[in-house]
Amino acid sequence: MAATVLQGVAHMIRNIRRSGRLDLRWSASELHSPSITHGPRGSIFCFSLSPINDDTYRDLSAARRYNIPVRLVSLNRPLNLVIVHLDRVGEEVQVTGRLAPQATLQ
C-alpha cells in the first residue's frame, strides 16, 4: 500500500513539475454520467471515467489525499476540481469533487 502511494505521488509530482499543476487527460477513457450540483458550500461535479489506467488512478488518488487541485483538460472547456471522493470499481473510477476557481491552480 505504501509503495503504491509513493508511486502515485512521484508520478503526480513529475506531472506537476512539467506544467505547474496537475492536468488530467483521458484520451483512452470515456466520461460517463456527469452532473453538477450547487449548494451553499460551492458546486460539486460528479462523473465516472472508464476504462481507467493505473497511472491515472494513482494521480487522482494522490491529488485527493494531498488536496491538490486538478484541471480536467479533456473537456471542451477545462474545469478545475478539488477531489473529495474517489471510488474505483473494476476498470471504472467514480469521481466527486468541488469546482475550484482558476486562481487555485496558479
Image (cartoon, rainbow, N blue to C red):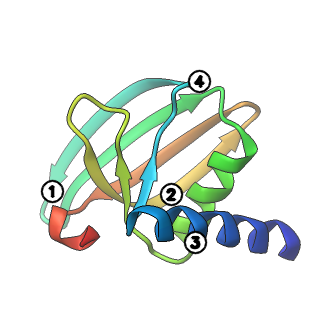
Task: State which mark lies toward you, 3 or 1.
Answer: 3
Q: Secondary structure at mark 1?
A: strand
Residue of label 2: 85
Q: Dot 4 corresponds to which residue?
A: 28
| 26 to 98, vertically: above or below | above
**Residue ID at (26%, 47%):** 79
Q: Secondary structure at mark 3?
A: helix
Within 10 angstroms of label 3, few (less than 14), some, or many (20 or more) residues? some
**Amino acid beneath label 4:** Ala
In the foreground, 71 or 92: 71
Which-is-in-front pick, marks 4 and 2? Answer: 4
Quarter residue 81 falls in: bottom left
Residue 18 image position (x, y, % from top left): 48, 64
Q: Which amino acid type is shown beneath numbered disc 2? A: His
Disc 1 residue type (three-letter): Gly
Q: Position of residue 31 (x, y in %)?
A: 45, 26
